Amino acid sequence: MTESPTSRAVQTVDCDILIVGGGFAGCGAAFEARYWGRDLKIVVADKAAIERSGAVAQGLSAINCYMGMRWNENQPEDFVRYVRNDLMGLSREDLVYDVARHVDSTVHMFEEWGLPIFTDPATGRYVREGRWQVMIHGESYKPIIAEATRKAASEVYERIMVTHLIPDAADPNRVAGAVGVNVRDGSFYVFRAKAVIVAAAGASHIYRPRSAGEGSGRTWYPPWASGSAYALLIQMGAEMTQMENRLVVTRFKDGYGPVGAWFLLLKAIATNAAGEGYEVSRLPELRERVGAYADAKPMPTCLRNHLMLQEILAGRGPILLHTERVLDTPEKEAIGWEDFLNMTIGQAVTWASQGIEPKSEPSELILSEPYVMGSHAVCAGAWTSGPGDIAPSEYQWGYNRMTTIQGLFGAGDTVGGSAHKFSSGSYSEGRLAAKAAVAFVRDHPDAPKVTDDQVRGLEATVFGPLDRYDTQRGLVTAGTVHPEVLRPDHALNRLEKIMDEYGGGVSANYTTNRAFLERGLHHLELLKTDMKKLAAQDLHQLQRAWELHHRVWTAEAVLRHTLFREETRWPGYYYRADFPHVDDERWKCFVNSVYEPATGRWRVFTRPYRPLF
Amino acid sequence: MPTYVLTDKCKGCMECVKICPSDIMHIDPSQGRAYNIEPAMCWECYACVKSCPEAAIEVRGYADFAPLGHSVLPMRTADKIEWKIRMLGGEVKEFTFPIRTTPWGSIQAPQDTPAPTAEAVSSELLAYEPDYLAVEALPTLPRKGGSA
């Protein structure tokens, strides 16, 4: 491990369970795998440092998934009804129920570990932000959770950009491990594992962000969320679901501060520029578009987006959140600022820099660019087996949260159909996957086979961009323009432009159609051809090159799923202009896909939706 | 935002390089000090700002929408974080929030708790359940659509 940055030393790590990604889902997996697998070698690989990696790196101001079963506040069935409603009917209710029934024990453990949760001194109960949310002083949420992970895991490997999963040399439908590059010392890591849990991130920067230049770092989901949750699995041939179910969030303009505490806890309202409410007056049009879903309570997240978008398109924006009407005490003002300082400091910076005083003036709201993820009010991801006691037979093939690849498990953003998990639910899902993975390892004690040819082939692929830079750099004098190679940042710009203009991004008001999607796929093919000429001048750019590959795999799945679903299921997330309505008769089902590694072909098809009750 | 590093304070200790989730805090070899190599991939997460032992890292809001003349800076200790916010007009706001209720390092490792029973291994229960659910039993439902 002391070689120079270009030594290409190979480090081989043999383990029982490999966890890819040390965010909340990965941390939950490491904890639970150790609890049940005391004798097992459990390894975590993360591309950053787990105290500040993943979507919770800067902290949170609320836990958004907590039932409160001990106070009979909610039961798991209530949560399933809520998610069913919010996702316009389509979620894997067995997975949703499973997260809900376990999530309270996760949150109680976090409190014991030292996470400060707001508690009402009169009742002893947690202070609710909304029906499912509890308020926390969550600046150190991630470092606290990481402390348990460091104690539980056999080894935590950091600064490893995991690029590919390795199939078993004897069985392409069985996972045998993963490879990646250490972006500090340039060594090639080969993890050989009996089971792999992918707990990596969803994706920002698939679609062009609203902000430009420096501001493109202020995406809602972190810029380091590069779609590894999907790309690693797709390339292995795992079945994916709901990849068209991308997320657009209502946020404070530019700083992307969250709105939950403002709407739910502080009871602030949003109006158009003239100070008028717009949701009620737009209901008739909404009913015409989506039928009875328009009257669901609470209104689904996508439909609230839709109504705001229509108001803006009608020329009645900007939309204003009236913070000034609710910050009537110093305590509430502190809650308002803490909400941002704990989880979106950039919004506090935006207020400070623009001189916005929230207790005396409203703030603008905006709809974000789209994101691909599986743990918020959407549920893109892998098609996984459900819990043994309740999953319908069509959703069950032996091990909870195992994908359609033997030994390959998912948790967090990786698992499709399992919406509204947020931090606590993703951690709980990591725990569920890990307990099942321990059982899998007990049942399959023999290590899968990885050949030298596989390793050498992957090594050549992974380091290709570095080699290309070295051989091509002499052609031009200096600068970033080169006729034979493509830089990762240039390729990212092209991906974002394609997705924005053809795949329903902000410049298209989230609208697309068959012709646009087919053109988008064509341009994506051209980009993929050019990506064979990606060049990286250092290890940091090599990480960016592989993040780009993962984003492109994710984007292709999004376009193919969006093309296949001939309806507009989630107006406010995206619109198929050629099929503008919700069509329950044909499309109240999952759109799933499989990329076949042997042929390079995609199959897209439907799977039935089965309500849990 | 992005972060910038004050020349007179940075000692090149690498703490920011180690913690940055976006891999954008690097050491400039000519100065031996840290800098932000890719501001457009900076999330303003403040992980580096909080970790810097010299308070050498600050943040200037994104150039495309944040006017100059502000600052938002934390001081994080073992149990709390103090924020000092300087608004565009010069007004200063200060807030202090707790971050942890127990000592760092005090979490009990799962392997240091009693081993699970064989019955628990084959059940739907997770670690410390049903105790930590704080209800009598893990909820379940009658299965629909036949058995697996």
Image: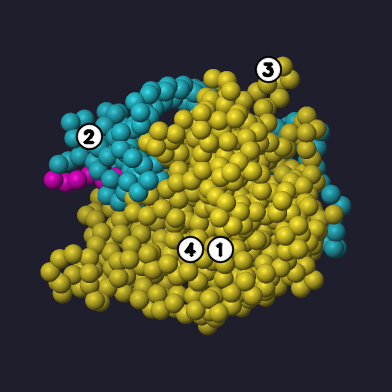
Chain colours: A yellow, B cyan
- Residue A550 at least partly seen: no
Q: Give the x, y percent position of residue B111.
A: 57, 36
Residue under label 4: A507
Residue drawn 65% across and 23% down?
Answer: A119
Nearest to the observer: residue A452 or residue A8: A8
Chain for disc number 2: B
Residue under label 3: A121
User: Label 2, label 4: how many angstroms apart (C-alpha)?
Assistant: 38 Å
- Label 1 element class: loop
Q: Where is A298 relative to A108, above or below?
A: below
User: Label 3, label 1: how many angstroms apart (C-alpha)?
Assistant: 46 Å
Badge 1: how crowded within 10 Å, few (<14), some, or many (20+)?
many
Front tag of 2 and 1: 1
Front tag of 3 and 4: 4
Q: Where is A513 relative to A271, above or below?
A: below
Quick one: which residue is furthest to the bottom in this view?
A: A599
Quick one: which residue is furthest to the front in this view?
A: A274
Q: Give the x, y percent position of residue A59.
A: 49, 37
Type of amino acid at the residue the image marks with label 3: Pro
Tell me which segment is drawn in magenta.
Answer: B25-30
Front tag of 3 and 1: 1
Quadrant location, the C terminus of chain A: bottom right
User: Label 3, label 4: how many angstroms apart (C-alpha)?
Assistant: 49 Å
Say the numbered circle drawn on residue A510. 1
Residue under label 2: B6
Residue drawn 40% across and 56% down?
Answer: A161
> Quarter-wise, where is residue A240 in the image?
bottom right
- Label 2 element class: loop
Is the residue at mark 2 from the same chain as the one at mark 1? no
